[in-house]
Amino acid sequence: MIELGVLFGLLAAMVVFLIVKLGRRGNRATENADGLLIEQTRRTQAHSDRSSYSSLTVHNTFPTMRDHRQP
């Protein structure tokens, strides 16, 4: 019975540690201009990908000459 208490205590401590570690990691700001430019580029690319590959866009467009599959 004591072993189960120790096991659950260790698991709970590990969960709390991971929550704190991952929670603090996401709030850091970028420190230099290069990092800001990289973040801006990735954010712009993600926005472009979301609009280009949305379900509505993919399923309601006609095949173009760039498509690799034949109709």
Image (spheres, rainbow, N blue to C red):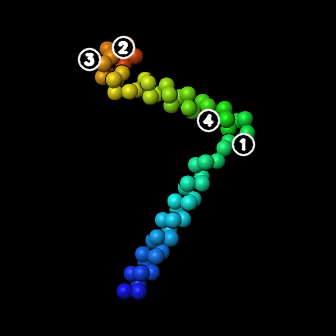
Circle 1 sits in a helix, a strand or a loop, which is it?
A: loop
Q: Which residue is mark 1?
A: 31
Indicate the amino acid at tag 4: Glu
Q: Position of residue 36 (x, y in %)?
A: 67, 35
Q: Residue at x 50, y 31 (%)?
A: 46
Q: Earlier in the sequence, mark 4 or mark 1?
A: 1
Q: Position of residue 64 (x, y in %)?
A: 36, 13
Q: Position of residue 33 (x, y in %)?
A: 72, 35
Quadrant in the rendering for residue 5:
bottom left
Q: Which residue is mark 4?
A: 39
Q: Which residue is mark 3?
A: 71
Q: Which residue is mark 2?
A: 64
Determine contact: label 4, label 1, CB under 8 Å.
no
Indicate the amino acid at tag 3: Pro
Front in this rendered view, residue 23 or 51: 23
Q: Is residue 54 above or below residue 21?
A: above
Few, some or many C-alpha atoms within 10 Å of disc 1 (few <14, some 14-19, many ≥20)? Answer: few
Q: Nearer the viewer, mark 1 or mark 3?
A: 1
Q: Earlier in the sequence, mark 4 or mark 3?
A: 4
Instruction: Give the position of the N terminus as an image quadrant.
Output: bottom left
Few, some or many C-alpha atoms within 10 Å of disc 2 (few <14, some 14-19, many ≥20)? Answer: few
